[in-house]
Structure formats: structure tokens, C-alpha cells
Image (cartoon, rainbow, N blue to C red):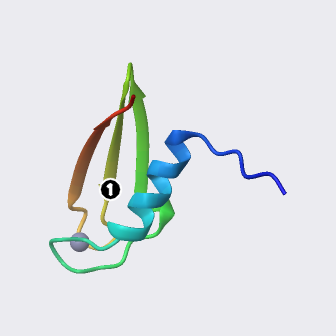
Amino acid sequence: MSVHRSPFERLRTKFDETERQCRHCGAQGDESAWRVTTTGGRVQYQFVCPTCDAIETKEIRLG
Ligand SMILES: [Zn+2]
């Protein structure tokens, strides 16, 4: 069983577990609501609520 996962994937999993709920309307997002982009040593997560279109952005510095 392969358990090799990048830090990137671990971060994503962490957010999936804790931040799936929209702060504005309380709707529950799924994985597809997250968009992940990397810029240099940073990872930016953008959550777009499927219900009210609120956008939540989180930025994490790697390393
Ligand atoms: Zn919402």
C-alpha cells in the first residue's frame, strides 16, 4: 500500500476536513468547490460556495 503523499495533498486533505462549510450561508461544499493554485512557495486555496457563490481564500506558505 502506497502512502506517499505530497505536502500539497496533505494540506488539501486538512482543509477538506475542517473548512468545507461556507461561512456565509452554512452550505456544505465538496472537494470540487476548492480550487488550488500554487505560486512559488505558496499554495492558495479558493473555496467557491456552490450555494451563495461566496469566495473564501486561504494562503499557505510551504516549507
Ligand atoms: Zn455559501
Relative to 13, 61 lies left or right: left
Q: Looking at the picture, how far across and down is residue 29, in whole percent?
A: 39, 71
Q: Where does the image place residue 60, in percent across and percent down from the top left?
A: 30, 39
Residue drawn at x 39%, y 28% as measured from the top left: 63
Q: In which quarter of the image is ligand 1?
A: bottom left
Determine whether 30 is above or below 13 in the image.
below
In this view of the protein, which residue sits in the foreground, 25 or 39? 39
Q: Is mark 1 on a helix, strand or loop?
A: strand
Q: Residue at x 44, y 49 (%)?
A: 11
Q: In this view, does 2 lie above or below 31?
A: above
- Label 1 packing within 10 angstroms: few (<14), some (14-19), many (20+): many
- Residue named by callout 1: 47
Q: Does 25 sit above or below residue 38?
A: below
* The quarter of the displayed image where residue 38 is located: top left
User: In the shown orientation, is residue 50 left or right of residue 30?
Assistant: left
Compare residues 58 and 22 and report the one nearer the observer. Answer: 58
Compared to 57, does 54 lie above or below? below
How far from the left and from the top, in percent, is residue 3? 73, 52
